[in-house]
Amino acid sequence: MYVEKLPFAFTETDVFNLFSKHGTVLTVKMKKPQSNVKFQYINSNPCSAYVNFADESSAKAALDALNGTVLLPGTNSIRIDFYQRANKFLGAMMGLKKEELIKNSHYRVIFIASIKSDVSRDQLHDVCSKFGEIETMTLKTKIVNGEVISRGIAIVQYATKE
């Protein structure tokens, strides 16, 4: 499952404990903003997490029980979705059509975050190509002082899921 708008104060343990009430959680991987901008987020919801359940029925139970819940006073409600549906958003960012998303297993598309700003598309391609043939790759960039730099996120779609 993909969970967004988690409070900054939450840890992976907090997320694990929250979701474990609805079934067996296998893994939790949390994403927080860089520590140098921490002060801006003390009372907001900038964090997201991937939560993997042992079975789909537990994931559905957690979605039904927790989606839209306010976890701490003064923060927004969390938003939860199954990873495959969240992956449609990533596919849209890559310019994939609905038919391509349906035929493409989510195991072929990966989302990479926390990429250093000085990493080029070619460098990223070299690293990712070690894991298989790349069909498409999108590295989000921005222009700063006339120089193109990474925004820190990329989406890679492999030709096969092996």
Image (cartoon, rainbow, N blue to C red):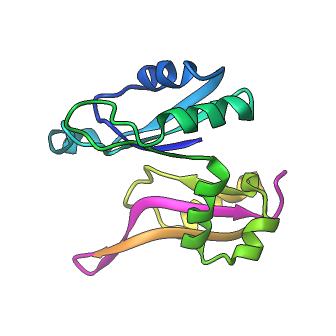
Q: Is 160 in the magenta? A: yes
Residue 143 visible in the snapshot = yes
**Taking 16 as reference, is 80 above or below it?**
below
Q: Is 79 in the magenta? A: no
Q: Is residue 12 left or right of residue 70?
A: right
Residue at point 82% right, 67% down? 103
**Residue 28's spot in the image, x, y percent?**
55, 29
Quarter of the view holding residue 14? top left
Residue stretch in magenta: 144-162
**Residue 60's spot in the image, x, y percent?**
65, 37
Q: Quadrant of the N terminus?
A: top right
**Residue 33's spot in the image, x, y percent?**
32, 44
| Of the pair 72 and 128, the residue shown nearer to us | 72
**Taking 144 as reference, is 56 above or below it?**
above
Residue 134 visible in the snapshot = no
Residue at point 72% right, 55% down? 106
